[in-house]
Every structure is written in C-alpha cells, then in structure tokens.
C-alpha cells in the first residue's frame, strides 16, 4: 500500500510528548521502518498586544498527531498495537480493534494543505495599550527613534498616538559588548544582529575593527565595547582576550564548558600562567604581575579540577585483578524533548577488535569481506538471527537491505544492535564504515536521566593517552548541544575504573550525614589542603602520613576511646559513597588502608569493657554455682 499519513488521537496537552516518544522509537529502529515520521500540525500566528508584537504557535488539531506509516498486510496490526501502547495515545483514528479494519489514511490534498500552511503567519491585533494625555513616552522605532515627548492626542479608532514637546539632543544611546575574532569580523551574527537594532552600520564597524586587529593573531577572540550615540555614530574600545579563552588556548582545547564545576582537561604550568597574566594585565585590577597571576589562577580553578589528577586517582583506586576499563560519565542538562546521540572515534584504542556483521548483497557484500567484516550475508543472516544467534558486536547494513533487516528490528533494537543512519551504520560506503569501526568508532547516547557513559581507556594505559581520548570525546559532545537549550549544557563529570569509586567527591548531603555520625562519636572531620596538611603533620610529628596526601583529602581526628568506632563508620560509609580510605595513624603508628579496615573490626573501649564484664560475670557465676554445689555436698 506504501507510505501514507494517519492520525492518532491523544490525551489533552500530550501531543508534543507523544510526538517525541514516537520520534525516539523511530531513531532507535523500534518500528523496523514501518513508522517513518511524526508531526503535530501547528500554524504560526502574529499577535500585537499592548503595543508588542510576537509570533505564537497554535495547534491546528488539538488532541491529534499525524504519523507517516507503511502498513503492509503482514504487519499493520502489530504496528498499530505498539502505537496504542505509547503513553498518551488514545486511539488510531479510523481503526476499530473489534472489527479489525485497517484505518483510512489522510488524502494527499489534506496533507499538502497542512504542511504548506504550517509556515504561514497569520496576524491578530489586540487592543492598543491605553495611554493618558500628557503621559511621557519614548519613540521606539522610525526616524524619530529614542526621542522623548508628551502625548497630546490618542486616536484609538486608528490605533495612533500624537506626540509633542520633543526633547532632542545628541547623547550616548547604548553600549554594545561583543566578542569578535581578530581580523575576521563579518556583518553576520553576532555583529549584524547586535548593531542593526541601534541603527549602526555593521559593514562600517567590520571594516574599522578588522583594520585595528589585523596585527593580532588571526581568529583570536577579542572583546570589544561599542559606544552608540543618538545620531547613530559610534566608536569602540578593544579589550584583551578573556582569560578562559587564553587558558583553553594554552591547554589546546577547541571548546570547553562554562560551568564552574567543569573538569578541565589539562593543568597550567607557572610559565603558562605568567604568559596569560602578562596579556591580561592591562584589563586587570592588579598592581603587579604576581597579583595578575593570582587573578588568572582563580579563573583557572573556577573552570574545574585537574583531569590528570582525576585519571591518576581512578587508576590508583582500581582493585580488580584484570586490566579494568576507565569509564567517563557526563551528566547533561537536558529537557525531556532533547536527545543527544552520536559516534566518536577515539584516537587511542584500548578495546579488542569488534565483531562486525554486514547485511549486504552482490558487490557490497564482497566489499565488506575485503574490508574485514566478521560476518557478511543477506536473508540468510536475518533467518539466523531470528533463530536466536547474536554472536556479534555491531551491525552494518546497506539501504537496500533495511526492509529485510526491519523484520528483526524488535530483536536488534532492544539490544542496541539495529543499524541506524544517525550512527553511520546504514550506508552505501560499507568499506568506510568498517574501517571506522575497526579504528574504534564508539556510539554515545544520553539516557533518560541525561547521563552519558563511555569507556575512555584502560588502567594500564598512559594517563596522557586517556586524557587525549577524553578531550576528543568532550569536543564532539559539546557540538551536540541542543539549539533551544538555555544555560549550562554539562552539569557534572566523573571518571572511575571498573568496580572502583568514581572521582567526583561527596555530595553536600553525604558530607553532612558523615559529619553528624562522627560528631556523635567525639570525632572531627576537616577537608584540608594537602600543602597545609603537610606542614601541620610535620609540626605534630605525624611522620609517614605525607604519602597519603594526594588528591582531595579529608582528615578525621578521634579520641582514643572511640577510634575503632570511627574507623568502623568510615569503613561502612565507603560502601555507600565515593569515599575512599587512604590510611591512618593509631598511637603514633602509621596504618595502611587495609590495616584501618582491620582496626575497625576491634571493639571500642565501652564495648571492650562490656565484653570483659560479660566474660567475668560468666566466670563468677560458674564459680558461685560450683561453691554452692560443694557446700550442699558437704552438708549431706
């Protein structure tokens, strides 16, 4: 019968949710190619309300969603059943489950009319905002823009106002702040849209800016402050590049996060810090270069912790006997309608070669065999998979085979093996796809909670190679930020070894809970700086503890009577959080982490007294019974 558009009835206000759910299932190959597109019919309308114009979207059919489907005789009932299982879907219009009749599709004319009208803008004008005679107003647009005056007359029938007593004098109209690449300014965004509303000639500014920055490093981001006057003339002042831009340049990053808790992929040396401070000195409130370096160092710290330290700690805390993987987790700030899914080729490989299965015929099948595919076939492989065989890691298909592959879509889709154009596994370039997979092309995808997990290396790998893999992955991920997302894209990052604690520290609630438990046992917890802790340990003659001052460190001090109980609390807490016991000191003797755990099994003072009294009471009771028995025997 071919593809056609059908209509689903949904619950009120569920149209967009149903659309997104169906679209996600289409991308996952869940419908095996039988459902190809989904649309919520809307039209745009222009409203003028209280003197303000805005474009709004209105649903053409509230409570209905259009779905494009191919419903062959062999599968249409199953496809409609799966659609009706989606939350918010009430029914398929024209489908009677009892009579089992195929629904009627929309006519081509009806589909054409809806898709054509979707881009039109209809105008609706609300009542003009009420004004008062004598009210002071300011003209917002036109030849007299920014002139001020008082209202003399308001004509509501024509929606006009008449102004008198103009106040006209040249003055500063506004300041525009931009960041523009040196020598490469163009009237395109952000320059044109920023200057256009103020009546400033964008080409004129571009020419002057490029002339003044032609001696700068080409493409270096330069902040500029433009002063716009009421007669549309302007001048501008150049600033030094932002410290964050210079830091990322020194670290070799093409992009980076703007979140304060972002993990930065690198570590600045003192020489790099001084170099940046010398560049920023003219714009910083600093008396000397040392003060400027401290300001730049603060910016660097606000960009996150040193990733090299995180990778080293993740490798150090791996306690399994095999060569564990290093897993990188990213928590994204996503809405329910957002999906982040793509592939990346990591430069430093660490995985075993993947078993690649290719669905292809003829020349493409031979091309796949030459390229090194593990399994190549067509209908025979489809039948084999139907029988339960799944001994491969990734599947590639040519477009002409997708109709056959769609028959096993339910099987492959649930296991993440369904070929998909978005992951470049549905392609005519079979050899190229196999080559990329052999190089280590890895798919990444955000789950329902907005978390992406990806392996970036092995514990045995050099840390620099792991960091390089993370850099490449993060650069690709940041390119996938949804265009309609406002605010931060990346919320937090974590790295851990297989079955090891992840490097991200304790949450506020966890730290508060731990402090309370320790306080109840006369113990104190302090998060310390390693360099200050070394000085304190030296003054207190705590020799041997310096070796444990690596990475984020917390010091717990306890009274002798409760020290074993405190060790027990810490040992119990490590199994429920990311806390890691490094070592300790008991009565002047340095303990390793294993010794601290063994020490936690000992009773504290009160427990020991109770146990001793229990043993003593038992012995005394036995002695009393023995003496009593002897006395009774003697009396007889």
Image (cartoon, rainbow, N blue to C red):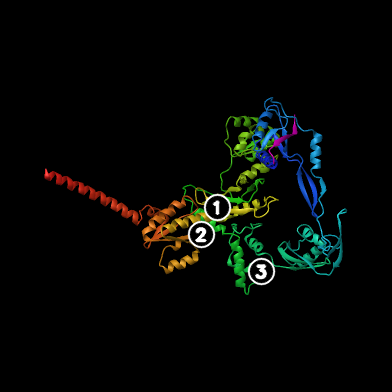
**Viewer-nearest of labels 2 and 1?**
2
Q: Residues within 10 Å of mark 1 (few under 14, many from 20)?
A: many
> What residue is shown with label 1?
495
Seen from the viewer's position, the closer of residues 47 and 22 is 47
Q: Secondary structure at mark 1?
A: strand
Mark before the other along the chain sequence, 2 or 1 = 1
Place of residue 236 in the rendered image (x, y in percent of width and height, measured from the top left)? 77, 68
- For residue 396, above or below residue 493: above
Place of residue 420 in the rendered image (x, y in percent of width and height, measured from the top left)? 67, 40
Q: Residues within 10 Å of mark 2 (few under 14, many from 20)?
A: some
Is mark 3 in CB contact (under 8 Å) with mark 1?
no
Q: CA distance from mark 2 to mark 3?
A: 30 Å
Place of residue 317 in the rendered image (x, y in percent of width and height, measured from the top left)? 48, 53
- For residue 305, above or below residue 275: above
- What is the residue that sits farthest to the bottom in this orientation? 287
Seen from the viewer's position, the closer of residues 435 and 530 is 530
Magenta run includes residue 6: yes
* Identity of the residue drawn at 80% across and 35% down: 110
Q: Which mark is residue 328?
A: none
Seen from the viewer's position, the closer of residues 415 and 380 is 415
Residue 347 visible in the snapshot: no
> What residue is shown with label 3?
280
As drawn, is 286 to the left or to the right of 232? Answer: left
Q: Which residues are magenta?
A: 1-12
**Viewer-nearest of labels 2 and 3?**
2
Seen from the viewer's position, the closer of residues 139 and 118 is 139
């Amino acid at each position: 019968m071919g593809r056609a558009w059908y209509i689903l009835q949904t619950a009120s206000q569920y149209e967009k949710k149903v659309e997104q759910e169906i679209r996600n299932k289409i991308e996952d190959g869940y419908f095996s190619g039988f459902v190809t597109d989904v649309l919520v019919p809307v039209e745009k309308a222009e409203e003028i309300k209280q003197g303000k114009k805005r474009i709004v979207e209105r649903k053409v059919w509230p409570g209905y969603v259009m779905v494009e489907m191919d419903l062959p005789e062999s599968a249409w009932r199953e496809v409609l059943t799966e659609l009706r299982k989606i939350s918010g879907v009430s029914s398929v219009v024209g489908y009677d489950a009892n009579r089992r009749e195929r629904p009627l599709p929309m006519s081509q004319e009806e589909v054409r009319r809806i898709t054509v009208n979707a881009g039109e803008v209809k105008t609706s004008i609300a009542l003009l905002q009420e004004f008062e005679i004598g009210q002071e107003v300011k003209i917002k647009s036109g030849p007299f823009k920014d002139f001020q005056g008082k209202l003399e007359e308001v004509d509501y029938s024509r929606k006009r106002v008449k102004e008198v007593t103009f106040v006209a004098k040249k003055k500063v109209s506004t300041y525009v702040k931009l960041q523009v690449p040196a020598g490469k300014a163009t009237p395109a965004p952000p320059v044109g849209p920023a200057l256009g509303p103020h009546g400033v000639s964008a080409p004129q500014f571009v020419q002057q800016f490029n002339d003044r920055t032609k001696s700068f490093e080409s493409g270096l981001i330069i902040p500029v402050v433009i002063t716009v006057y009421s007669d549309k003339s302007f001048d501008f002042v150049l600033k030094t590049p932002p410290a964050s831009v210079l830091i990322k340049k020194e670290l070799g990053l093409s992009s980076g996060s703007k979140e304060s808790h972002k993990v930065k992929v690198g570590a600045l040396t003192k020489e790099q810090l001084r170099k940046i401070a010398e560049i920023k000195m003219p714009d910083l409130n600093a008396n000397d270069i040392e003060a400027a370096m401290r300001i730049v160092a603060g910016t660097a710290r606000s960009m996150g912790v040193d990733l090299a330290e995180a990778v080293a700690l993740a490798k150090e805390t791996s306690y399994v006997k095999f060569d564990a993987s290093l897993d990188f987790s990213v928590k994204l700030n996503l809405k329910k309608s957002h999906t982040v899914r793509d592939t990346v080729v990591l430069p430093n490989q660490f995985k075993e070669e993947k078993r690649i299965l290719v669905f292809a015929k003829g020349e493409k099948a031979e091309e796949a065999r030459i390229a090194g595919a593990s399994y190549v076939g067509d209908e025979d492989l489809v039948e084999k998979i139907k029988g339960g065989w799944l001994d491969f890691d990734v599947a590639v298909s040519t477009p002409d085979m997708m109709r056959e592959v769609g028959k096993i879509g339910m099987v492959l889709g649930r296991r993440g093996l369904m070929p998909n154009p978005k992951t470049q596994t549905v392609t005519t370039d079979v050899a190229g796809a196999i080559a990329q997979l052999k190089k280590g092309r890895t798919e990444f995808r955000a789950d329902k909670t907005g978390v992406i997990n990806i392996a970036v290396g092995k514990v045995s790998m050099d840390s620099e190679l792991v960091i390089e893999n993370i850099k490449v992955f993060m650069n690709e991920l940041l390119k996938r930020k949804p265009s309609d997302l406002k605010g931060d894209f990346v919320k937090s990052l974590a790295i851990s070894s297989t079955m090891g604690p992840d490097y991200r520290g304790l949450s506020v609630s966890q730290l508060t809970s731990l402090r309370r438990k320790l306080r109840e046992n006369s113990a104190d917890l302090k998060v310390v700086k390693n360099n200050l802790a070394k000085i304190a340990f030296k003054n207190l003659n705590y020799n041997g503890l310096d070796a444990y001052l690596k990475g984020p460190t917390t010091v717990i001090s306890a009274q002798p009577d409760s020290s074993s109980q405190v060790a027990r609390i810490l040992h119990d807490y490590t199994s429920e959080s990311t806390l890691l016991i490094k070592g300790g000191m008991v009565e002047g003797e340095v303990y390793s982490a294993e010794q601290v755990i063994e020490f936690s099994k000992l009773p504290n003072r009160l427990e020991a007294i109770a146990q001793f009294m229990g043993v003593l009471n038992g012995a005394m009771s036995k002695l009393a019974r023995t003496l009593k028995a002897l006395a009774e025997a003697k009396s007889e």
